[in-house]
Image (tube, coloured by chain):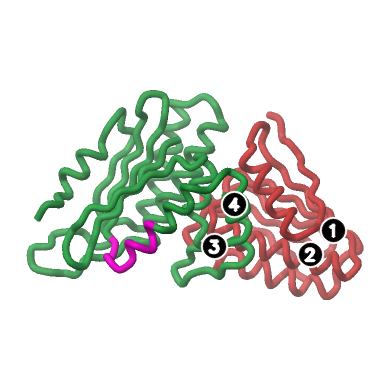
Amino acid sequence: MESISIEGTPKTPTVNFDAATGVIEIKGRSIPENSIEFYRPLVEWLEEYSKEPQSLTTVNIQLEYFNTSSSKCILDVFKKLEAIKKARNEVVINWYYEEDDEDMLEAGEDYESIIRIPFKMIEVVD
Amino acid sequence: MSFNIEERYTKMNKGEVLLAYKGSITAELITNVLGVVESKLDHVIDKSITKKKIYNILVESLQNLYHHVDDLPELAGNDMDIHFGIFVISKVGDQYEIRTGNFIKNEKVKKLKERLDKIKSLSKDELKELYKFVLNNQKFSDKGGGGLGLIDIARRTEGRVDYEFDDYDDDYSFFNLNITI
């Protein structure tokens, strides 16, 4: 299965999805006016990956900013991961947030309470 | 006609203005404005978290504006730009204010008022629950909005969101949203 590797822009995040290692990363900013187009291939990739996932999938989400249009798409990503976990595979989600960024920590807690996979909350100190 | 766009714009320009705009609201414009304001904020604010909060709210409020501008019909004498909107970002005392303004069809006013009043009446925890409910249950609109923008802004500002509607004509009103950070 092909990997996904996308460079970040001022409005869209850096994305690295690697089926061989089971490491899934979204980093940077996600603030496009309409995020559906950006996230559709990512969600489709996860759909495909979920047919034959690694025994351990590691997810690193490190966002500086994301808008509400992205928040729904990010939930779609998490729902795919939830399905992988439900099929008895291990899924670890690391949610990074900048020191003192309560809003970003809370955003992680919101997702955690919706998808029922425990998140590791990791505070990034400069 | 009682409503005058110039008067409204002047009224919105209060405090120490970082950026004020009146005209077409396009995706390119918003991208440019976000870039400009971000580097301005870097100069005037030291605290990274405050900067982030303002930037986040700015993204949400400008994209909200972009998605919800109603165009006035092209009548003779209407020299308004297409997708006309206004926004002002300013510092008033030790607070920041983001004000946006756009035309809206009168038939939508009642629903928007009710929605804003509801959001304003909710506590921090109730806003969190509403946000999560809408996030998990509501489909995207055809404009790509998720119905979360105003709830998100209210959460981040702890409800410091005010609004005003100016009567324009039989079909349209001018919607003013004032956010204090």
- Tell me which chain the residue with mark 3 is part of: A
Task: Tell me the element at label 1.
Answer: strand
User: Mark 4, chain letter?
Assistant: A
> Circle 2: is it few (<14), some (14-19), or many (20+) Cα within 10 Å?
some
Q: CA distance from mark 4 to mark 2?
A: 25 Å
Circle 4: residue type? Gly
The alpha-carbon separation of the residues under discs 1 and 4 comes to 25 Å
Which label was assigned to residue A82?
2
Chain A colour in the picture: red
Kind of element beneath mark 2: helix
The mark that comes first in sequence, 1 or 3, is 3
Q: Residue under mark 1: which chain is it in? A: A
The percent position of residue A120, horizontal first and vertical second, equals 80, 46
Residue B79 appears at what percent x and percent y? 13, 59
Co-location on one chain, circles 4 and 2:
yes
Residue at numbered disc 1: A91
Q: Residue at x 42, y 56 (%)?
A: B64
**Are dots 2 and 1 in contact, CB under 8 Å?**
yes
Residue A113 numbered mark, or none: none
Q: Amino acid at mark 2?
A: Glu
Give the numbered dot on residue A8: 4
Residue A70 lies left or right of residue B34; in this view the side is right
Circles 2 and 1 on the same chain? yes
